[in-house]
Image (spheres, rainbow, N blue to C red):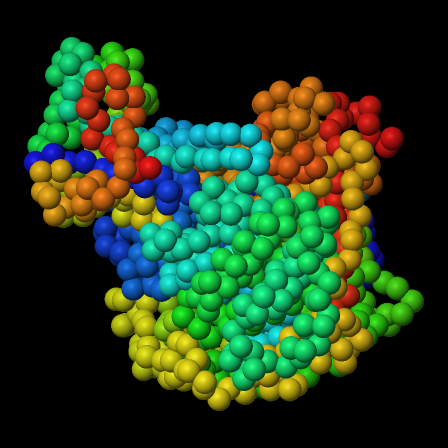
């Protein structure tokens, strides 16, 4: 198959014509799919339909209400849902905007090269689009083997494409939520406690007496249940300690704000560990009974005094002492929060190891007000034949590195797509579902290079994102309000299950992912892996295995089940076998030592910005989820663009005024595609700037988001890879200000 | 009966959920709002404070908007709720100018619109949409004349303030500080 360099394609005006025609031309294609039914839609009166939210990964369960015209009106949290307790966050409440957004993808699109060599998208029927996908997948399978295909997913529909790919013979199924987000903390906590944190994290915030947040900005990241519990903790008089170069919202709720110099967190953590051991503030019984390697740790940290850390972190030694004492006084009801997006400087697994060790010394793991023991339901899958075992996976392309990575690395799959002499088979086909890889993966140039080496790129999404423009085939997914999906089965204090069902019929010519995957399975001769007739039959079968039914779930939305494996917390002196090599909580990690890594966390100085450059820090805003909501009409109304936060001293030096548009240029000479407005604020250190992630969209078809603000992803070209698990550290980038774009390009 | 709201600035994170919940509950058109967030930063790095407030109509006991309305469209409902009767409103905008809190807007359909404390919900025994949705549970709503209402209780326990008290409007939205 000839490889053509992919031009970035805008969803052409043809698709707009398609809306006006109401998809009339395509209706002829619909009857051939009558056999796979979409199931019944919700009531057309004002009654409620159960759903769980798809705007972020917290997946809160709620109810969709419609108005008299049968249009989606509002979404309200389900009181029984442990993830939200009846209260949705602004994004979930604004989820209606995702349904109403007129910029949605409306019809399947196929890339075409005209006689003049110009590439365009043309609308296609579902039959033709899926037929083309199946044909190209078969060609890759025949020429190179099925393992040369991959799936990137960050959405509920990904489960079905995952099954399709596994049935096809590939195990390259990656979510950027691992190597670009929470991977290092999972590896660090597994290395220490034998268990990862998973989602939602089992932090017992509602009962804590001391919450320590390191770069985690709860309240700006609306991890709903955690924000709610933090509010309870404030009511209960808990102490909050926030470590952040920026005076975040939660810093303003904290007793102590430690405005740390960026990239020095491990030094602070080591000093805290030193203080807690040196002053014998650690939980002696817990440490003696449950941990391994205390003596080695004690010896190792003996010189990491608060004075030592002061020189590195700029945090006053007395503050380090006082905060260590606050934690010890609250122990074991203390949470040194692991955070969520933790891929910062490439030594992230080690930083999170230090966090885990600190929690272990304070005895907070398995204790009230610390970390509870979560439980999750086990729901059997609808029966299907065993998946074939792939001959190879993305790991083969890693040269034996990142063995401790527990899940596939999205960045690794991307690397394995670029041909190299070491690789006998590079990945040639991608299916991308619900993740805008151009903005999600760091180093855009590399992502685009990988894409240019593909024989097939299928993008499944609800919106025209940047990644959509690179697709060969675009499959428009209906929103979560218009479809069934797999059951939500997540861990928590109580095991629980939640149902998503369509509140209304899909708008435009859009379809659910399960439907696309099942139709593709037919075309690929894999239908035995999707043996159910309707999704309702499949969900009902699954629910009956756990003592419920689809009928019941339609009424209740969420069902909690009793715990089966003991209490929420460890009993006093309970015998516990941890899932580590030693069966203990490993302060000294034997697993890391075996792999040739430091068994205890080491502080290494990181590169600092040159004069005139500033650390590029980025984060979240409460009303947006990454780049996925920045065109949602309801949420754009709350925040339509990001700003660059600049300390007044820096502003004075550069003569920057509030609201003034500037371009940002990074250490590698990359200039932001769009200008961003300056926000002069005391809330940021003078060596850093701050922007909210997810803005600066370059796709003109996003009528509200196009050109609004700046994309941090575009400026993250220096990637600090974690040698332990392959996480892509993104905080090692520096920016300076440019007042005009053109004169600087290429300089 | 005197309806009132107390909002805890110590818990509010300024997420704006109250704003979007109000929009979807009350069909407030995109681009307009009945409630909004104010964030005030004080101090210099690193000695800083932020006060975050979810603001809306204060349902004042002495409302300039009711006084200045030429048609009587702006009026008090039971419990002191200040509302606008749509069909009586001529959209002159006198109330918008008179409100010290800038709590009213001109609806594209030609009348003036504002917070109603979700009167339609209160009548059904529900909380206003903003109170019901708030993830930090920082808002309390109820009857000031009932000593056992949540709002009465929290105002007894906590320090509070009202906005622009010097305007003499006697607001019924209190901020816990």
Q: Quadrant location of the C terminus of chain A? A: top right
Q: Is residue A580 left or right of residue B107?
A: right
Near-viewer residue (A95 or B63): B63
Near-viewer residue (A52 or A369): A369
**Residue A471 appears at what percent x and percent y?**
68, 52
Q: Quadrant of residue A608?
A: top right
- Give me the residue at 53% from left, 42% from top: A248
Compared with residue B40, is residue A497 higher up or lower down, i.e. above or below? below
Q: Quadrant location of the N terminus of chain A? A: bottom right
Compared with residue B31, is residue A412 higher up or lower down, i.e. above or below? below
Q: Quadrant of residue B58?
A: top left
- Give me the residue at 21% from left, 40% from top: B155
Near-viewer residue (A284 or A467): A284
Compared with residue A459, is residue A611 higher up or lower down, i.e. above or below? above
- Give me the residue at 21% from left, 26% from top: B171
- Give me the residue at 78% from left, 53% from top: A605
Q: Is residue A226 visible?
A: yes
């Amino acid at each position: 198959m000839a490889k053509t360099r992919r031009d970035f394609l805008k969803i052409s005006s043809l698709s707009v014509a398609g809306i006006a025609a109401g998809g009339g031309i395509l209706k002829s294609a619909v009857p051939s799919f009558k056999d796979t039914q979409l199931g019944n839609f919700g009531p057309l009166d004002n009654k409620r339909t159960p759903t769980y939210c798809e705007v972020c990964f917290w997946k809160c369960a709620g109810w969709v209400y419609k108005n008299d015209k049968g249009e989606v009106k509002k979404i309200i949290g389900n009181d029984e849902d442990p993830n939200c307790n009846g209260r949705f966050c602004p994004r979930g409440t604004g989820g209606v905007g995702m349904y109403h957004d007129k910029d949605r993808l409306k019809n399947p699109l196929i890339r075409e090269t005209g006689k003049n060599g110009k590439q365009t998208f043309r609308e296609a029927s579902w039959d033709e689009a899926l037929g083309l996908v199946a044909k190209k997948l078969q060609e890759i399978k025949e020429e190179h083997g099925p393992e040369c295909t991959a799936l990137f997913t960050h959405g509920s529909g990904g489960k079905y494409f995952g099954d399709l790919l596994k049935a096809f013979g590939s195990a390259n199924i990656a979510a950027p939520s691992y190597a670009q987000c929470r991977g290092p903390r999972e590896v660090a906590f597994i290395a220490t406690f034998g268990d990862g944190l998973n989602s939602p994290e089992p932090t017992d915030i509602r009962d804590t007496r001391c919450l320590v947040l390191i770069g985690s900005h709860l309240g700006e990241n609306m991890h709903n249940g955690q924000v709610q519990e933090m509010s309870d903790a404030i009511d209960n008089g808990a102490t909050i300690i926030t470590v952040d170069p920026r005076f975040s919202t939660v810093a303003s709720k904290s007793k102590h704000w430690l405005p740390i110099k960026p990239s020095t967190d491990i030094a602070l953590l080591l000093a805290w560990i030193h203080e807690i051991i040196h002053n014998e503030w650690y939980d002696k019984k817990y440490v003696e009974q449950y941990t391994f390697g205390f003596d080695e740790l004690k010896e190792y940290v003996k010189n990491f005094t608060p004075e030592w850390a002061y020189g590195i972190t700029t945090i006053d030694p007395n503050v380090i002492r006082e905060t260590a004492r606050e934690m010890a006084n609250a122990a074991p009801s203390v949470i040194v929060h692991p955070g969520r997006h933790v891929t910062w400087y490439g030594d992230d697994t080690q930083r999170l190891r230090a966090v885990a060790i600190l929690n272990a010394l304070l005895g907070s793991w398995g204790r009230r007000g610390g970390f509870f023991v979560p439980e999750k339901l086990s729901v059997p899958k609808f029966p299907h034949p065993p998946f074939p075992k792939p001959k190879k996976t993305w790991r083969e392309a890693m040269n034996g590195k990142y063995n401790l990575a527990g899940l596939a690395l999205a960045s690794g799959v991307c690397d394995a797509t670029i041909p190299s002499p070491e690789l006998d088979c590079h990945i040639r086909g991608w299916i991308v579902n619900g993740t805008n890889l151009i903005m999600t993966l760091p180093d855009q140039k590399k992502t685009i290079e990988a894409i240019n080496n593909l024989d097939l790129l299928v993008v499944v999404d609800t919106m025209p994102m940047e990644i959509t423009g690179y697709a060969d085939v675009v499959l428009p997914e209906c929103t979560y309000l218009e479809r069934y999906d797999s059951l939500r089965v997540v861990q928590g204090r109580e095991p629980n299950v939640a149902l998503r069902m369509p509140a209304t019929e899909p708008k435009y010519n859009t379809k659910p992912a399960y439907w696309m995957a099942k139709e593709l399975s037919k075309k690929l001769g894999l239908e035995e892996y999707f043996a159910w007739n309707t999704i309702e039959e499949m969900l009902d079968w699954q629910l009956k295995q756990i003592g419920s039914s689809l009928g019941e779930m339609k009424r209740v939305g969420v069902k909690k089940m009793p715990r089966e494996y003991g209490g929420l917390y460890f009993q006093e002196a309970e015998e516990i076998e941890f899932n580590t090599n030693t069966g203990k909580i490993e302060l000294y990690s034997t697993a890391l030592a075996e792999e040739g890594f430091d068994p205890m966390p080491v502080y290494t100085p990181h590169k600092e910005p040159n004069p005139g450059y500033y650390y590029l820090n980025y984060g979240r805003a409460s009303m947006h989820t990454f780049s996925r909501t920045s065109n949602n009409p309801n949420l754009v109304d709350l925040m339509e663009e990001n700003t660059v936060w600049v300390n007044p001293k820096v502003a004075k030096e550069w003569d920057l005024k509030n609201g003034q548009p500037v371009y940002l240029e990074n250490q590698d000479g990359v200039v932001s595609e769009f200008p961003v407005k300056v926000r002069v604020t005391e809330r940021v250190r003078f060596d850093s700037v701050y922007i909210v992630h997810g803005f600066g969209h370059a796709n003109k078809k996003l009528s509200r988001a196009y050109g609004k603000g700046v994309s941090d992803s575009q400026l993250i070209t220096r990637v600090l890879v974690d040698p332990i698990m392959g996480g892509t550290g993104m905080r090692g980038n520096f920016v300076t200000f440019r007042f005009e774009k053109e004169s600087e390009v290429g300089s | 009966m005197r309806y009132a709201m107390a909002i805890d600035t110590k818990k509010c994170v300024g997420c704006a959920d109250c704003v979007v919940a109000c929009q979807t509950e009350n069909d407030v058109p995109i681009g307009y709002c009945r409630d909004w967030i104010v964030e005030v930063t004080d101090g210099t790095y690193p000695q800083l404070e932020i006060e975050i407030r979810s603001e809306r109509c204060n349902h004042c006991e002495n409302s300039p908007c009711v006084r200045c309305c030429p048609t009587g469209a702006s009026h008090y409902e039971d419990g002191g709720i200040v509302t606008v009767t749509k069909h009586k409103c001529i959209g002159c905008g006198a109330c918008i100018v008179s409100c010290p809190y800038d709590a009213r807007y001109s609806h594209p359909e030609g009348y003036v619109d504002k917070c109603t404390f979700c009167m339609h919900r209160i009548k059904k025994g529900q909380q206003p949409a903003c109170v019901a949705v708030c993830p930090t549970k920082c808002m309390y709503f109820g009857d000031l004349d009932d000593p056992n209402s949540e709002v009465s209780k929290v105002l007894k326990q906590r320090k509070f303030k009202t906005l622009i008290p010097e305007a003499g409007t006697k607001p019924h939205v209190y901020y816990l500080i």
